[in-house]
Image: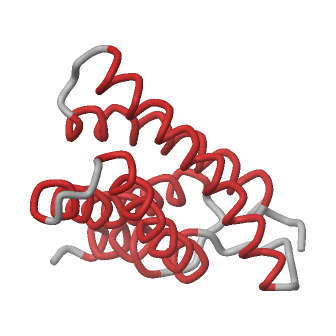
């Protein structure tokens, strides 16, 4: 592998960074992992376990939230503003609860009111909630230069 390409991969995937663009790329990938688990679990619970799709959505979103938290503190964001990890996780969960509310609202709206299949509703909803989550987490929990 050419040296320059290796450096780009290192900066994007391996080394700690305060660069917001690299953090967005990492958040996109970590969000992608959480999305796959979230959507897969939503599908399994709804289609195979007979759980109502909004209940399945809450359960699967919660699992995705835990995955996102772990990847955020371990890989995406370098700066952690809160020294108390319980308080940090509480704020993270609060942001997630708002995201869950948005997810439930948009899932209901797109599926029940507009008639979009619940999986497609999940995709649309994920884009909207992704933007909310990144901005809220970056500004409240992982600001550069403040600890």
Residue occupying image coordinates x 84% and y 77%:
87
Q: Nearer the viewer, residue 54 or 92?
A: 54
Determine whether 80 is above or below 49 in the image: below
Q: Nearer the viewer, residue 23 or 111?
A: 111
Residue occupying image coordinates x 54% and y 40%:
131
Image location of residue 100, percent across then percent down: 54, 49
Q: Nearer the viewer, residue 50 or 131?
A: 50
Image location of residue 83, percent across then percent down: 87, 84
Residue 41 image-quadrant placement: bottom left
Q: Among all residues in the image, which is located at the extreme top?
A: 114
How many dots with numbers?
Answer: 0
Image location of residue 34, percent across then percent down: 36, 65
The quadrant of the picture occupied by the C terminus is: bottom right
Determine whether 53 is above or below 23 in the image: above
Q: Nearer the viewer, residue 84 or 145?
A: 84
Residue occupying image coordinates x 22% and y 23%:
116
Determine whether 26 is above or below 72 in the image: above
* Relative to 40, 48 lies left or right: left
The quadrant of the picture occupied by the N terminus is: bottom left
Residue 95 image-quadrant placement: bottom right
* Relative to 25, 82 lies left or right: right
Residue occupying image coordinates x 37% and y 73%:
7
Image location of residue 139, percent across then percent down: 77, 51
């Amino acid at each position: 592998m050419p040296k320059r390409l290796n450096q780009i991969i290192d900066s994007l995937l391996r080394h700690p960074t305060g660069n917001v663009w690299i953090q967005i790329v990492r958040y996109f990938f970590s969000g992608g992992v959480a999305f796959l688990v979230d959507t897969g679990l939503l599908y399994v619970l709804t289609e195979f376990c007979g759980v109502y799709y909004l209940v399945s959505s809450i359960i699967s979103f919660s699992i995705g939230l835990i995955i996102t938290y772990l990847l955020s503190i371990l890989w995406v964001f370098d700066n952690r503003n809160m020294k108390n990890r319980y308080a940090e996780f509480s704020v993270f969960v609060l942001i997630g609860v708002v995201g869950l509310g948005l997810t439930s609202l948009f899932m209901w709206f797109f599926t029940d009111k507009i008639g979009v299949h619940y999986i497609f509703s999940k995709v649309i909803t994920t884009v909207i909630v992704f933007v909310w989550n990144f901005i809220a987490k970056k500004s409240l929990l992982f600001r550069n230069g403040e600890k």
